Image (tube, rainbow, N blue to C red):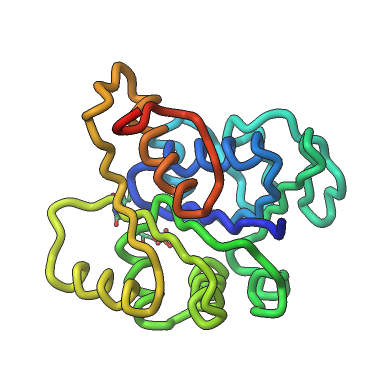
Amino acid sequence: MPPIVVALTGASGVPYGVRLLEVLLQQGISVELVISPSAVQVITQELEYTVDLNRFSPVQLGVTGGTVSDSDQNLYQFGKGNTLHYNHYQNYFTGIASGSFKTSGMVICPCSMGTLAAIAGGLSTNLIQRAADVHLKERRKLIVVPRETPLGSIQLENMKRLVDAGAVVLPAMPGFYHRPKSIQELVDFVVTRICDQLGIDVDLTARWGT
Ligand SMILES: Cc1cc2nc3c(=O)[nH]c(=O)nc-3n(C[C@H](O)[C@H](O)[C@H](O)COP(=O)(O)O)c2cc1C
């Protein structure tokens, strides 16, 4: 299947995005990755990883198992024949900036209120916003995972604009009915819901009624 675009932006909750990346790669799915500069700050704060957007490697996110396929192209090969392609957030010359490049959808996880507003306004001021705009115009799946509380009327209106435009707004709100015992279980709850939306079968957490 064509790759899934994963974008990390500067909202709290980067462990959700990193786990999503890990799970997709383990499932043999190819990923096109973009990271915003603010996400780098949050990654340092929440995971104590140092990410260099100009010299990126998946190991900087704790994602192991990839071998460099083409360092000039920031392409990494994973065990099931799938790839991770890292895209710089200012590079519009890359595939995902265009609707002619096939993808299986895009997830922005976590999605800051800033990125959410920019997409709702159609701004496309960086590659993340542009790729999201492309997914909406091509009627492909766009999933945004906001993490903010409480929510103001502008933020709620922006979310409604995105839903009206065809996006899925999937807040990082783990449930507790599976009686989680660890943070990992809370993270996996949200990642499972994202994978459900993408139509990808994962078995990370107990489901209601099973
Ligand atoms: C440690 C840290 C935590 C943040 N948490 C949030 C958050 O939970 N939600 C949010 O919308 N913005 C949060 N921000 C603010 C965004 O990072 C900021 O608005 C930034 O401009 C977003 O840029 P981006 O969307 O390009 O990543 C946080 C910033 C920092 C440094």
Q: Quadrant of ligand 1?
A: bottom left
Q: Position of residue 205 (x, y in %)?
A: 41, 28
Which residue appears at 83% of the width and 40% of the height? Answer: 68
Q: In the picture shown, does residue 149 fall above or below 157?
A: above
Q: Position of residue 116 (x, y in %)?
A: 35, 67
Q: Position of residue 35 (x, y in %)?
A: 54, 54
Q: In the picture shown, does residue 144 fall above or below 95?
A: above
Residue that protrudes farthest toward the top in the picture: 181
Residue that protrudes farthest toward the front in the picture: 209
Which residue appears at 29% of the width and 16% of the height? Answer: 181
Which residue appears at 29% of the width and 22% of the height? Answer: 180
- Decide if residue 163 is on the left or right side of residue 41: left
Q: Position of residue 103 (x, y in %)?
A: 65, 65
- Decide if residue 7 is on the left or right side of residue 2: left
For this rendering, which residue is in front, 104 or 88?
104
The quadrant the N terminus occupies is: bottom right
The quadrant the C terminus occupies is: top left
For this rendering, which residue is in front, 53 or 16?
16
